[in-house]
Image (cartoon, rainbow, N blue to C red):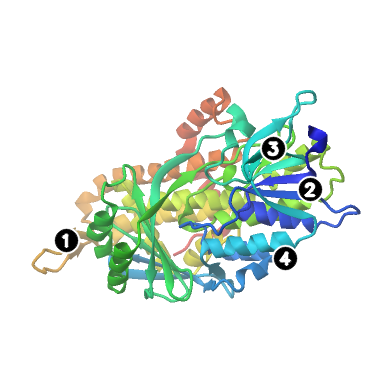
Amino acid sequence: MHSRSPQYDVLIVGAGIAGCSLAHALSTVPRANPLRIALLERSLAEPDRIVGELLQPGGVNALRQLGLEACLEGIDAIPVRGYCVVEDGKSVHIPYPGTHEGRSFHHGRFIMALRAAARRARGIEVIEATVTDLIEDDIAGGIIGVRATRNGEKEMWLAKLVVIADGCFSNFRTVVMGDKGAKSTTKSHFVGAILEDAVLPIPNHGTVALCKGFGPVLLYQISQHDTRMLVDVKAPLPSDLKAHILMNIVPQLPSSLHLPIKAALDKDRIRRMPNSFLPPVQQGARKGVVLIGDAWNMRHPLTGGGMTVAFNDVVTLRSLLSSIEDLGNWSEVKKAIHSWHWSRKPLSSTVNILSVALYDLFGADDEELAVLRTGCFKYFECGGECINGPVSLLSGISPSPMLLAYHFFSVAFYSIWVMFTHPQLIQPRSKNGGQREYSVAPIYQYPALFFKALRVFWTACVVFGPLLWSEIRWWAPTSSTYNTNFKFLRTMMPIVSTLGLAMLIYRQGFSF
């Protein structure tokens, strides 16, 4: 039966962002005998999703390296030149450095362009089929292919290397990783809608609105007339999402958006996607198969870094696999997968950590996080390197976990400084139109503020430390070693963070 099944060098499950780009990338590797690649997707119709619509400059650069930059043409994509962060009527402009640009677009149109590029590439066969099982070699062990249903008929496809790229709802993640894999966690959902002819505060910029008492709202233009709105809603989800958005979120957004939002909510159904975090774990224990993309590693979509990580992963993996003559040589492939795991860390770790840390600050749900959120906004208001550094990290232009740690704890200490020295709101605006009252904390409040400052710093450590730990460990997060080391890390976090930040300050300087 195996002898009658199609034989390939590489079989990729999932023709999405990671699957299409990897198939195309491997087809361009110079070889005496071109690779035979099968790209299987359960539906080749244009997908309709509310995420995966903003590509950071670092992702555009990776797309260019893969020879796929043309996929951004002819889909009504919009240039993105930075962000505008809005809170309580105030805004701060956060442009990308220099001439760097991202792109935003309808997800489905971009996917169809990637699939078309894969079809045109040498040696790739794009197949519409639903993969149901992975085939294991009973004698030699390892995965040697897949079973799938095509046109109602069950078929088998065999390959030297199977790549699972079936996205965040992967059916095969557990099969591949077993008990060595991490478990995804979901803190909230993005609720999405498309606004027609909406006017954003700054054209060609993503808008992040910070809403008191609720999660952030992300808006960006995805075509000439369409603007995507993503509202973060924490669990448990309200029974009436439309009423929640109209009553609690819309009043905190710029007035120019109120009518387009109401029109969109009346016209279209509200859709949602889980905001999941899945840290990467070293692969290679299961012979013949590897995970890529959201099937293996996810981060919060607030920073729009998922596609940037995926495309850069493909760039790195293509380089490592290109030197292997026979992809059936698992010992060589395993070495390449191990190298890939660590080679991707500067970018992937930066984007992964920043996405969740920034969400924790922007979606502040306790007093200490609220202090950090206020400090973060005012940190951006300082301009200069307080903007260039963070946005270079977010955009994938300057991937550096050390630089991320420097700016994150700079925000933490600046937040404490703001708490002591900047006027704080003491009297909200009354319903009859009275003015808000602000006042700098008097000296007699300093003792209480000192203890609050300790709690704020501890909160910053608790946010950043576990995220960093999830990136530097290589063993399974369920193991006893992980649990022991994690408890030790939580105990030592303030000390380690203070010493590390002191070193960074000494080497890079610290000014506002």
Q: Of marks 4 and 1, which one's residue comes earlier in the chain?
A: 4
The quadrant of the rendering that contains the C terminus is bottom left
CA distance for labels 2 and 1: 60 Å
Q: On the image, numbered disc 3 is attached to which residue? A: 146
Tell me which numbered mark, 4 or 3, is placed earlier along the sequence: 4
Looking at marks 4 and 2 on the same chain, the residue that comes earlier in the sequence is marked by 4
Instruction: Name the residue beneath numbered marker 1.
Output: 428
The CA span between labels 2 and 3 is 21 Å
Please give left or right for residue 508 compared with residue 333 in the image.
left
- The residue at the far left in this view is 432
Q: Quadrant of the N terminus?
A: top right
Q: Are marks 4 and 1 in contact (CB under 8 Å)?
A: no
**Residue depth check, mark 2 versus mark 3: number of the one nearer the observer:** 3
**Would residue 450 be seen by someone viewing this image from the given angle?**
no
The residue type indicated by label 4 comes to Gly
Q: Is residue 153 above or below residue 30?
A: above
Give the image quarter of residue 332. top right
Residues at marks 3 and 1, CA–CA distance in whole angstroms = 62 Å
The circle drawn on residue 156 is none
466 displayed left or right of 112 = left
Residue at 78 percent across and 42 percent down: it is: 6
Query: Which is closer to the viewer, label 2 or label 1?
Result: 2
- Residue matched to label 4: 67
Q: Nearer the viewer, mark 3 or mark 1?
A: 3
Q: Is residue 48 left or right of residue 193?
A: right
Mark 3 closeness class: few <14, some 14–19, many ≥20 residues within 10 Å: many
Residue 131 at x, y percent in the picture: 63, 40
N-terminal of the two: label 2 or label 1? 2
Residue in the foreground of this view, choosing between 412 and 122: 122
Task: Please report the residue visible at 46 percent of the width from the left and 32 percent of the height from the top.
Answer: 491
